């Protein structure tokens, strides 16, 4: 067997490899905005073309525009331009603070060696364009475990729970020391958790994520496209 990865074969990629999460960040952004009272699932946005922010033009992944859409449609069809408007309602300081509460920019504390924290730049360093792109998961980086932990709060009544691999410890004398779930913080209200879950069920039933729906089940989900740098940084 030839190892084509070199030393990279020994990485635990769930905690030691960071990436820009892309569109799976959109439900977190939307949940924050709903929780803060900035939007409702029925608020609308006019998606008529690209959005110019600083010196950049922000477009949708498929370069298609959907006209007047609701915030639920925004998740169903993963509309980048719509998400920029949501981020502008939040502003850099609030958005950054809530993203940090969801665990971005810091390790989860799982009982594994050499966990990376990802990158969430200080909010004072956020340009308007970075604020816009962070809303759809470009401009911050995270480990897969951080993303899963944040998503779990969406489904778990808004409670962010620290991940763990230890259920219990059995001592030499036979006593068992249980390790109950470590609840970290109530980052969303239960009502917001229920609302964003319903929106994500619609994303699977009616949106781009329908290809991932298992027959006979109702699930909440979201597509996750992101751009990565190729050779030469393109």
Image (cartoon, rainbow, N blue to C red):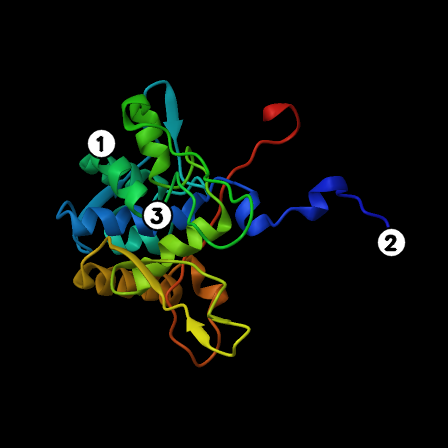
Residue contact at pointers 1 and 2, CB within 8 angstroms: no
Which one is in front, 147 or 133? 147
Residue 53 location, x and y as percent?
A: 31, 24
Mark 1 nearby-residue class (10 Å; few <14, some 14–19, many ≥20): some
Kindly identify which residue carries mark 2. Answer: 1
Secondary element type, mark 2 = loop
Q: Earlier in the sequence, mark 3 or mark 1?
A: 3
Residue count near mark 2 (Cα–Cα under 10 Å), binned few <14, some 14–19, many ≥20: few
Dot 1 falls on a residue whose secondary structure is helix
> Is residue 232 visible from the viewing direction of this image?
yes
Q: The C terminus lies in which quarter of the figure?
A: top right
83 or 154: nearer the eye?
Answer: 154
Query: The residue tagged with tag 3: helix, strand or loop?
Result: helix
Identify residue for label 1.
93
Q: Specify few, some or many for label 3: CA neighbours under 10 Å numbering under 14, 14-19, or 20 or more.
A: many
Q: Which mark is residue 26?
A: 3
Residue 191 occupies quadrant:
bottom left
Disc number lying in front (2 or 3): 2
Q: Earlier in the sequence, mark 1 or mark 2?
A: 2
Q: Quick check: 27 above or below 92? A: below
Q: Residue at x 43, y 72 (%)?
A: 177
Q: CA distance from mark 1 to mark 2?
A: 50 Å
């Amino acid at each position: 067997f030839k190892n084509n990865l070199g030393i990279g074969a020994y990485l635990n990629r769930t905690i030691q490899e960071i990436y820009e999460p892309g569109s799976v960040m959109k439900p977190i952004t939307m949940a924050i905005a709903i929780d803060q009272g900035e939007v409702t699932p029925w608020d609308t946005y006019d998606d008529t073309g690209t959005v110019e922010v600083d010196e950049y033009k922000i477009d949708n992944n498929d370069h298609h525009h959907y006209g007047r859409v609701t915030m639920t449609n925004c998740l169903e069809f993963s509309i980048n331009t719509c998400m920029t408007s949501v981020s502008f309602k939040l502003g850099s300081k609030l958005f950054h603070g809530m993203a940090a509460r969801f665990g971005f920019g810091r390790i989860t504390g799982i009982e594994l060696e050499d966990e990376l924290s990802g990158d969430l730049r200080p909010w004072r360093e956020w340009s308007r364009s970075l604020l816009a792109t962070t809303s759809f998961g470009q401009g911050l980086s995270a480990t897969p475990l951080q993303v899963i932990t944040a998503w779990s709060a969406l489904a778990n009544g808004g409670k962010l729970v620290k991940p763990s691999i230890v259920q219990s410890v059995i001592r030499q004398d036979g006593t068992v020391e249980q390790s109950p779930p470590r609840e970290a913080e109530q980052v969303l209200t239960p009502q917001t958790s229920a609302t964003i879950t319903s929106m994500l069920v619609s994303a699977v039933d009616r949106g781009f994520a329908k290809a991932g729906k298992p027959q006979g089940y109702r699930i909440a989900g979201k597509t996750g496209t992101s751009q990565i740098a190729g050779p030469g940084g393109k």
